[in-house]
Image (cartoon, rainbow, N blue to C red):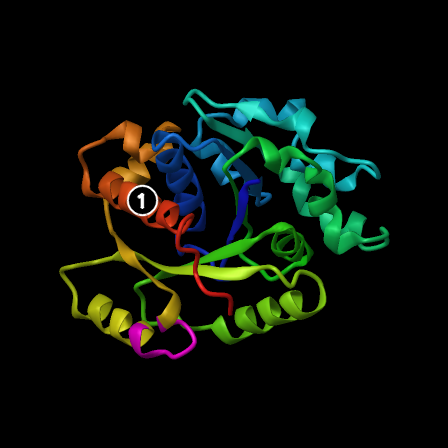
Amino acid sequence: MARIISILNQKGGVGKTTTALNLGAALAELGRKVLLIDLDPQANLTHGLGMSDISSKGSIYDVLVNQHGVVAPYIRLTRWPRLDLLPSHIDLSGAEIEMVSMYGRETRLSRALGDVPQKYDYVLIDCLPSLSLLTINAMTASTEMIVPMQAHPFALDGIDKLLEVYSLVKEQINPDIILAGVLITMFDTRTNISREVQERLQSDGRLAPHLLKTVVRQNIKIAESQGAGVPVIHFDPACHGAEAYRELAREIAAQETSPPAAS
């Protein structure tokens, strides 16, 4: 059975899509079978895999708004072995309005997944930057979540609300979900502010126990790889961005034998 991991933070621009894409590719490189789910109407994960042309054939939108939607018919193979994608589409921006009156609206993704997780080692869900009904669906379907946090002075803005929603989902809908890690992204080794933000996170009692050892530094190759529609580990295998995501994949894979404590 797959580990289903939501990658979320209601702040935009913190590296959620970058993390989902490149962690997924690095886990696939390790031999794990991975399904990426693009749950953001901007469809950046879909575009970042060079697959924007397939969304017209159906996407996560069709799954969520169909009364008996299932994900299996919409899963697409990528160019890389063991890495599959459930694409997104701009139509997803209207899905929440359509879902409001639906029965079990918070659990539509969980039910639509069906037995698909049995065919994968990992399902990674790239969430949109808001604590919305779509994000609640992702958390309800997940066994774990990873929170990317940019090494920026405003990194902790909104974290109280995120943790509040996480607690509510855990208490009322999905008691099995755990916080698998907090990932520091866009770390700039040239500045004091990045180190200061890292120290703030390390001293925050809510987050410190969950901080991942891997730190993703700023790297132009990561942005270039997304523009080319190729995971950075395949775009420039020797760059430090590629190595960071390989390190992250090894760290996450190590949790298979030593899972993070529930919180």
2, above or below 75, in the image: below
| Any part of residue 146 in sight | yes
62, above or below 255, in the image: above
Residue 249 place in picture, x, y as percent: 34, 43
128, above or below 2, in the image: below
Q: Residue type at mark 1?
A: Arg
Is residue 205 inside the magenta stretch?
yes
* Numbered disc 1: secondary structure: helix
Q: Residue at x 71, y 68 (%)?
A: 172
| Any part of residue 154 in sight | no
Tag 1: Cα neighbours inside 10 Å, few (<14), some, or many (≥20)?
Answer: some
Residue 50 place in picture, x, y as percent: 45, 26
Quarter assignment of residue 184 = bottom left
**Image-based side of 191 in relation to 165, left or right:** left
152, above or below 31, in the image: below
Residue bearing the label numbered 1: 250
Q: Nearer the viewer, residue 128 or 176?
A: 176
Quarter assignment of residue 195 = bottom left
Q: Residue at x 44, y 50 (%)?
A: 16
Q: Nearer the viewer, residue 84 or 261?
A: 261
Residue with the most extreme front position: 257
**Image-based side of 243 in relation to 172, left or right:** left
Dividing the image into 4 quarters, which one contains the N terminus? top right
Q: Residue at x 23, y 30 (%)?
A: 236
Q: Which region shows up in magenta?
A: 202-208
Is residue 206 inside the magenta stretch?
yes
